[in-house]
Amino acid sequence: MNLIDFNSPLWETYKGAYGSVKDDIITLTNEKQLFYKKSENSDYYIAFENLFENLSHQMSFYNATYITLPYIVALLEQYENNFLEQFYIISNVGYCIATDIPENHSKEDKIEQSILDNYKKSFFILQQKTKKFLFEHMELLNQMSSAEKSEFCTSILAILGDKYFAYILILSAWDIFYILCDNCEYCDEELSFSFSNKQELSQITPATYQLNEWDNISFDDTFVWLSNVLSILGEEHLIKILSYYCGTYTCPRCGNQKKVIDFIKNYFENG
């Protein structure tokens, strides 16, 4: 995993939403302080907040992510014995990873192959460190607030499972099902877990959750592994919502049936 030198002109080529992220990376690398213990006026706290906002603003993908991810992974290594610091790094970097979907990339983007290779290598290391953190700290994770656990689980979904699914959950705030039928073009932008009535939600047959179904190894089936993690963390409400996202939707106009998430992906891809 290669860390781009701070004197490299690449920092001016690969930018975030607000320009170069080099200064924030330098601060995070040199300060060696703790995000969760610093005041909101500290240089470290400001750099931490700025960096992740720069890389995920409005859930767009920014090329700075390619050369920044290795440094974020290095930060994880730096704080490998600090639960809270790793927790906040993973909870934030997952949102950046979730932006790395085809719709957020331009065909005109020309990224150096060595940069792409290094990014992929960094992502692989991030996955391994995230798995290690998850399995080693279930008890401590269970002590975090519901909002923090929701954010963390959304992030690890992007890192370990399905980037696009995580992207959708973030934009939908774990609540709205943006439906677009690929057969008859029926569109529903107001179907909500919180605000729709039972009759409206009856168009969805939720997936069935089974306790202890996950083998603690495979991350191929999003509903199986994520619902089991949420159960361990005591987030039963989120399991219910997830069961609807992973359920089956029947189009009220043409009867077309498929997974809810597929109707939603069609909405984001073609809506």
Image (tube, rainbow, N blue to C red):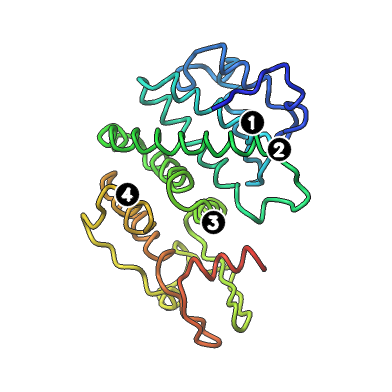
Mark 4 sits on what residue? 230
Q: Position of residue 162 (x, y in %)?
A: 47, 53
**Looking at numbered disc 4 in the image, what kind of residue is underneath it?**
Leu
CB contact under 8 Å: marks 4 and 3: no
Which residue sits at x=73%, y=21%?
8
Amino acid type at image mark 3: Ile
In the rendered image, residue 58, in percent from the top left (x then y), is placed at: 66, 45
Which of the two labelled residues, at mark 3 and mark 1, occupies the earlier sequence position? 1
Amino acid type assigned to the residue bearing label 1 in the image: Ile
Q: What residue does disc 1 label?
A: 67
Q: Nearer the viewer, residue 56 or 116?
A: 116
- Mark 2 — residue? 112
**Marked residue nearer the N-terminal end (4 or 2):** 2
Which kind of residue does numbered mark 2 sit on?
Answer: Glu
**Image x and y of residue 46, in percent:** 60, 22
Q: Secondary structure at mark 1?
A: helix
Circle 3 sits on which residue?
A: 168
Frontmost of labels 4 and 2 is: 2
Neighbor class of circle 3 (other Cα within 10 Å; few <14, some 14-19, many 20+) is many
Other-residue count near label 4 (Cα within 10 Å), few / some / many at <14 / 14–19 / ≥20 = some
Residue positioned most to the top: 31
